[in-house]
Image (tube, grey):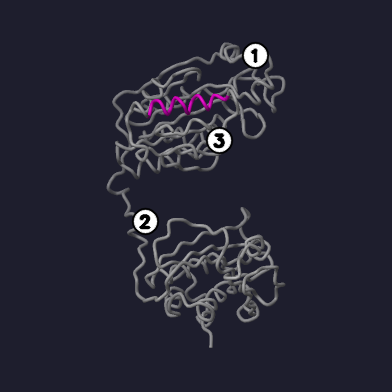
Amino acid sequence: MTKFVETSNLPFCPGCGHRVAVINTEKALERIGLNPLDVILVTDIGCHGIVDKNFHTHTIHGLHGRSPALAAGVAAALRNPDKKVIVYMGDGGATIGLQHLVEAAHRNFNMTVFVLNNMLYGMTGGQGSGLTPKCYKTMTYPEGHPQAGYDLVELIHAARAPYARRLVGRGDYSDIVEEALKINGFALLEIVEVCPSYGLKFNRGKRLDYFLEVSGIEEKLLIHENRQPFTLSERETAPLLSEKLAIEVEFNSDFKGTKRIVASGSAGEGVQSAGEIFATAAITSGLHATKKGAYPVTVGVGFSTAEVIVSDSEILYTGIVVPDVAIITSVDGLGHSLSRIQKMTEDGILIIDDSLDVPETRAKVIRHPFRKETGGRTAALRALAFYNSKVERLFPEEALLQTLRRSKLAGKVKENVLKFD
């Protein structure tokens, strides 16, 4: 096993230049002598991004083209020259996120960007990108691209990046990767490759050198000397979120163990807020809690599911595979959580609105008219309160009431939603 990257099982097609880029990155990092946990790799959507799991460093995976923006935030917040922020992105992401790249170069964030330019969108079928060279055939230009792509190195140099370089990604170029990694400030290394799946398929009989010559693409290095990396001013420096959002312990809980709770209902019915209030109430009672939300991209439509873990010990993860408790308040929620409900054991508890059909499950079933009692918009919050009051007491009822009073729902939701005779 290598120190920074597991290179024996890289998830790329045979002959892909991304494989060569990763191996060269590994060699360069080894020579520099950093600790793997001093390296933060930021990737986004594209073939390059599936390599995250091979890195033994910190990794962040973002949206298409947004990796430079994420990396800029990391670099600015770290304020530590001993840490190394690395970005991998493809030519598609580089042109989708071109403004992010230009801004990061212009402000000179301390980060190294590797643009793995295989001249098309390799993950989605071989469409042309903003860096596709002239005459290069793609799915969108089967007769050949009519014009040359952007000269990314010139653009980044014009933004006054300390270092902008292009090379053809063949063989051992780890010395150049090492050079880019050692730059104090923003560095961009564009690595020109061929996609073996689509580039060779659409351009049969043509080699990379042919397109380099036809398009006038050439290896180049452009530098701006004596630029200091971006640093936050005192005015821009904000307190850490952990300090700003600290939750004080005000109540006591006798609960021991861990409960994995899935609350699932419909979008727009306050499921996420209910999960946050429940988790916060647990923390105010001296317990540990996490909350994870899931809902469709189109907000306000379909299901909404909150996954809450409550424990008397530290929680090192979020998300629930098989819940201990499933709380279902609508048809949408039942549909989204059905597979997990069916996996529950005899030790599990299913709390379901009595307007719904009970699905097949081995869990103990409790039916209650939550929607009838308080309406759909507060059914999830009432169901969670019901669980804590009537089924399994995790923390005092007053903790939940106090949390509601301090939440964004204060004055909007009546406190009797949380009370039971």
Query: Are the residues tagged 1 and 2 within 8 Å (C-beta)?
Result: no
Q: Secondary structure at mark 1?
A: loop
Give how far apart the Cα atoms at labels 1 and 2 are: 54 Å
Q: Residues within 10 Å of mark 1 (few under 14, many from 20)?
A: few
Looking at the image, which residue is at 41% across and 18% down?
Answer: 221
Q: Is residue 247 above or below residue 38?
A: below
Question: Looking at the picture, which amino acid does disc 2 mark?
Answer: Leu
Name the residue furthest bottom: 421
Given this view, does label 1 or label 3 mark the residue nearer the observer? 1
Q: Which residue is mark 1?
A: 206
Q: What crowding class fits label 2: few (fewer than 14 Cα within 10 Å), some (14-19), or many (20 or more)? A: few
Residue 96 circle label: 3
- Disc 3 marks a residue whose amino acid type is Ile
Q: Could you say where residue 140 lies in the image, as x and y percent from the top left? A: 69, 28
Between disc 1 and disc 2, whose residue precedes?
1
Q: Residue 6: say if magenta.
A: no
